[in-house]
Amino acid sequence: MSLNLTDVTLTYPDGDERLVALDRVTLDVEAGNVTAVVGPSGSGKSSLLAVAATLIAPDSGTVTVAGTSTAGMSRGALADLRRKKIGIVFQQPNLLPSLTAVEQLQVTAAIDGRSVSAARSRALALLDTVGLADQAERRPHQLSGGQRQRVNIARALMNEPPVLLVDEPTSALDHDRGAEIVDLIVGLTHRQGTATVLVTHDRAHLVAVDEVVEVADGHVIGACPRS
Ligand SMILES: Nc1ncnc2c1ncn2[C@@H]1O[C@H](COP(=O)(O)OP(=O)(O)OP(=O)(O)O)[C@@H](O)[C@H]1O
């Protein structure tokens, strides 16, 4: 189960013209691997993640998520694919303030139509995996920034997605906490066999990942040194 973008071009309206955000981008992420995407601001990293997440349809090219091509899919079918196959971790955890850590994960299962109580044991096991076994009953304001990001990651994995997309997960953390989060993502990816894309600004984190792809002006300009 992997993630493949082939020859993807994405443009946005820009006055009377079109701004090319992604220009014939091809990206293959194998199951069990973390591919980091790096590049300057405005180079297209978020656009690439949004296309991979099927949140934006490319102008041309194909996106294949865990063996399923998204070409021609209805909005409903895409939403279904996202729910079942893609875990997304945004920069800010966006946790619900009134819910405990374990409830944040249970809600995800409920949205997916699974039984909330059956989801509880999986949620507790996942919190254990991300090092939060003893924080399960805490609410977001009782957790540190790093712990909130761990809940965010555990929540993204709740429905066992084969594809994990992570956007700048360390931007609100100091270097050491950031490195711990990247190590956690890499460890989970290797153990659970997800195909993971990690957008990051911090090149110090690249030593931990399996592959690095550099983008500039909407182009993949190739693999680059990992540190
Ligand atoms: N919704 C939009 N409408 C129009 N132009 C956009 C839109 N989103 C992004 N862009 C433009 O597309 C290009 C790529 O932007 P994108 O956000 O993908 O880059 P990025 O590498 O993620 O940048 P950053 O690191 O600052 O988040 C930029 O020129 C940006 O201004």
Image (cartoon, rainbow, N blue to C red):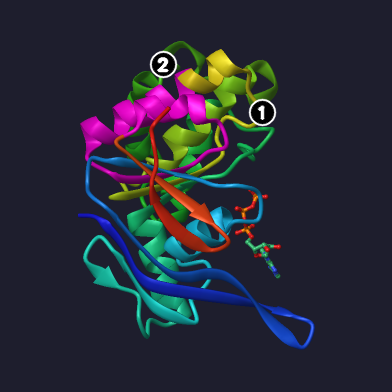
- At x 55%, y 29%, the residue is 149
Let me know if residue 121 appears in the view.
no
Q: Position of residue 30 (x, y in %)?
A: 23, 49
Looking at the rendered structure, which numbered label has been put on residue 172? 1
Q: Nearer the viewer, residue 28 or 217?
A: 217
Magenta residues: mostly which secondary structure?
A: helix
Q: Name the N-terminal-most of marks 2 and 1.
A: 2
Is residue 205 magenta-colored? yes
Crowding at dot 1, Cα within 10 Å, few <14 / some 14-19 / many 20+, comes out as some
Task: Give the structural element (helix, strand or loop) at label 1.
Answer: loop
Q: Position of residue 104 (x, y in %)?
A: 53, 36
Q: Is residue 67 above or below residue 205?
A: below
Residue 21: name its quadrant: bottom right
Mark whose residue sits in front, 2 or 1: 1
Task: Give the structural element (helix, strand or loop) at label 2.
Answer: loop
Q: Position of residue 151 (x, y in %)?
A: 50, 29
The amino acid marked with disc number 2 is Gly
Crowding at dot 2, Cα within 10 Å, few <14 / some 14-19 / many 20+, comes out as some
Looking at mark 2, is its residue's CB closer than 8 Å to ligand 1? no
Residue 170: name its quadrant: top right
User: How many discs appear?
Assistant: 2
- At x 27%, y 44%, the residue is 194
Is residue 218 magenta-colored? no
Q: Which residue is mark 2?
A: 131
The amino acid marked with disc number 1 is Ala
Residues at discs 2 and 1 in contact (Cβ within 8 Å): no
> Which quadrant would the C terminus be assigned to in this image?
top left
Q: Is residue 55 above or below residue 161?
A: below
Which segment did they paint magenta? 180-209
Q: Nearer the viewer, residue 77 or 187?
A: 187
